[in-house]
Image: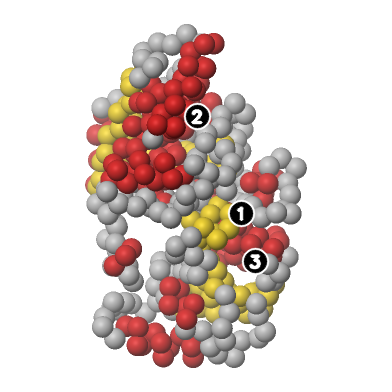
Amino acid sequence: MRNIALTLLASALLFLSVTPSFAIDVRAAVLRVDYQTLLPLSRYDLKPDDLGFAGAALADQDNNTTGSFMGHTYETLQVSAPPEEADAALDRILGEGIRLIVILARAEDLLRLTDRAAEEGALVFNAQAPDMAIRDDACRANLLHTTYSYGMQADAVAQFAVWKKWTDWVLVHGSNPPDVALADAFRRAARKFGARIVEEREFEDTGGSRRTDSGHVMVQRQLPVFMQDLPDHDVIIAADETKYFAEYLPFHLWTPRPTLGSAGLRPIEIHGGHEAFGATQFQNRFEALSERYIQPLDYSTWIALRAVGEAVTRASTADPMGVRDYVISDQFELAAFAGSKVTFRDWNGQLRTPVMLYDGRLTVSISPQDGFLHQTSPLDTMGLDRPESQCTAFN
């Protein structure tokens, strides 16, 4: 805590030495849309009530540490609503004059809310939806993304598999639309990095209870049979965004192989065991504030609000488009405990960041992997690169 405070103080003093400061009161909001979902397969994965909001609280704490030396104050309103009340909740936020908004919602709701925010000149940060289209031909000029896309997730996993020379894949995906979208990203990653999908199988979501006393018994009988008679392969790539079956895969295969993707080795923004790159102090501060381990939605919310704080500090503006223009400029960078400073892509508003690969306890690796080169940044080997993007809103 002492070291991080000294770092923030030094940053503020450096800025003050070259730029006059003036008071800025920064009001932001986090709008979390709460959906009715099935309980997770494991009780360890139950969502905390303050999911996302705890990340916002830590960002306010960090921003105010620097802001206190510059006459800047930060306050973030925390709002949760079911989908049918999300529009009204956004209108209340806008009615309070707030124009910097982090939204935790699915893509279809996110786009509608973003368009409504644009009518009032508000800037939106997407901290949850991984869909590719909202970073591509459905992008918005007032929408930035601090969470991974499906493409970034798949590319990070693919790079590790190819680096290990595990290039023959069996792709197993669920039947729900998010599962199919993630599977599409893995197909694209295989073509991009020279892997070969030797067979695909779909595990159908038939509904029903997933947590009955006999659930694991049924899975133990079903999955090995489902995974019989495969061609020679190096790894199983699982695409199960709805978390219906993949977590059972690693120990219920017919032929034992490593599992990557939605189970086994997974791409993740952050996890409670991450300690490298100064993250121990970050984890300690989060846990002291929230009394739990950090989750990815906390981190993507924290990143969004810290980006706002950095823009206010460096560019002396809290105007939404002023913040946007600064964070997608070459001047912006943010230390995020990920191994390299993060930036935003100026062609579609996606956060450019390393991707952790996590086994449930440890960071096993971080992509981009050694040897995957790019003319601008190795980070741009993951997700939509500039020539691939059809986003024109940022032109």
Q: In the rendered structure, which disc, 1 or 2, sits on the residue that comes first in sequence?
A: 2
**Residue behind mark 2:** 324
**Residue at left 35%, top 88%?**
217
Evaluate whether residue 107 shows in this view: no
Q: Residue furthest top?
A: 20
Q: Quadrant of residue 222?
A: bottom left
Q: In the rendered structure, which disc, 3 or 2, sits on the residue that comes first in sequence?
A: 3
Q: Residue furthest front?
A: 2
Question: In the visual, does 298 lie left or right of 223?
Answer: left
Residue closer to the observer: 293 or 184 = 293
Q: Circle 3 — which element?
A: helix
Q: CA distance from mark 3 to mark 1?
A: 11 Å
The percent position of residue 144, horizontal first and vertical second, equals 49, 39
Q: Amino acid at mark 1?
A: Ser
**Residue behind mark 3:** 161
**Residue behind mark 1:** 367
**Residue at left 36%, top 88%?**
218
**Residue at left 48%, top 88%?**
224
Query: Is disc 3 surrounded by few (<14), some (14 to 19) or many (20+) residues within 10 Å?
Result: many
**Total labels drawn:** 3
Residue closer to the observer: 184 or 84 = 184
The percent position of residue 79, horizontal first and vertical second, equals 26, 41
Q: CA distance from mark 3 to mark 2?
A: 35 Å
Q: Amino acid at mark 2?
A: Arg
In this rendering, the answer to whether 312 lies above or below 205 is above
Q: Circle 1 — which element?
A: strand
